[in-house]
Amino acid sequence: MKGRPCKVVDTSTSKTGKHGHAKCNMTGIDIFNGKKYEEICPSTHNMEVPEVKRLDYQLLDVSEDGFASLMLPDGSTKEDLKLPEGELGTQIQEMLDQGKDIIVSVLMAMDEEQIVSAKEAPK
C-alpha cells in the first residue's frame, strides 16, 4: 500500500454506485515501521503483494555505531543491519552483555531488511 510492504488488517467493500465499480477499502499496517495506511481501489483491479522472507541468523556482536554482525549459513558475516531502536534493541544489547548466544530474526521485503525479534540460542 502506498509503495510500502503492509499487512492488511481490515477490508470492506462498498456496493456499485452510479460511477460503476464496487470499491474496496483496505487498511494495512507497515511491517517495518508500524504506520497505518488506507487505500481505496475498484474491486476489479489487482493489488501488488510483496514477497516477504524471514530468516534467522546468529548475532556475533554489535559495533559502536549500532550495526549488528550476523553469521550467515555459509559462515560469512553480514554487517549492514542496524540494531532496532527501542525495547527490542535494548533487550538484544542486554542479552549480548550477559554473554548469551542470540538468534535474531530478520524480515526482508521490497529491498528492505530489519531485525524484528531475538531469542536465546538453544544450547
Image (cartoon, helix red, strand yellow):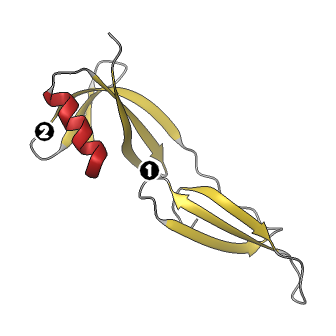
Nearer to me, 70 or 30: 30
Nearer to me, 48 or 39: 39
Q: Amino acid at mark 1?
A: Asp
Q: Nearer the viewer, mark 1 or mark 2?
A: 2
Does residue 45 appear in this view?
yes
**Residue 87 drawn above or below residue 122:** below
Say the numbered circle drawn on residue 63.
2
Q: Which residue is mark 1?
A: 111
At mark 1, the secondary structure is loop
Q: Residues within 10 Å of mark 2 (few under 14, many from 20)?
A: few
Q: Position of residue 65 (x, y in %)?
A: 12, 47
Lower sequence index among marks 1 and 2: 2
**Residue 65 drawn above or below residue 3:** above
At mark 2, the secondary structure is loop
The residues bearing labels 1 and 2 have C-alpha atoms spaced at a distance of 23 Å
Q: Amino acid at mark 2?
A: Ser
**In this picture, residue 46 sits left or right of residue 36:** right
